[in-house]
Amino acid sequence: MKARVHVMLKNGVLDPQGEAVRHALGALGFDGVNGVRQGKVIELDLADGTSEADITSMCEKLLANTVIESYSVEMV
């Protein structure tokens, strides 16, 4: 069983990496990019029977800083 965890900074939290990407895209001639938010994807290879509650607990305790980040879980 696999799960993908998508982690992004919450709205209102400054994203310096996203801003650097936006700036670099402009420098490369891509003028239509008004904003970039950068996040991460974590793919988990889980034992059968791992519950969504277990995955949520993993996210809350380690995978996401819930003060400034939000996350979503996708079962694949």
Image (cartoon, helix red, strand yellow):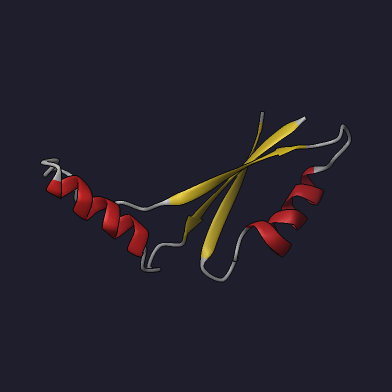
Q: Residue at x 73, y 52 (%)?
A: 56
Residue 67, relative to residue 43: is it above or below?
A: below
Left or right of 49, for residue 9: left
Q: Residue at x 13, y 49 (%)?
A: 27
Q: Quadrant of the N terminus?
A: top right
Q: Percent x, y for residue 42?
A: 61, 44
Quick one: 25 or 51, which is closer to the camera? Answer: 25
Q: Residue at x 40, y 62 (%)?
A: 11
Q: Residue at x 36, y 59 (%)?
A: 17
Q: Percent x, y for residue 18?
A: 33, 56
Left or right of 48, for residue 30: left
Q: Residue furthest bottom?
A: 67
Q: Quadrant of the C terminus?
A: top right
Residue 11, relative to residue 48: is it above or below?
A: below
Quick one: 47 or 75, which is closer to the camera? Answer: 47
Label tally:
0
Quick one: 26 or 66, which is closer to the camera? Answer: 26
Q: Percent x, y for residue 35?
A: 25, 53
Residue 14, relative to residue 1: is it above or below?
A: below
Left or right of 23, for residue 12: right
Left or right of 54, for residue 42: left
Quick one: 3 or 24, which is closer to the camera? Answer: 24
Which of the 4 image quadrants contains residue 45?
Answer: top right
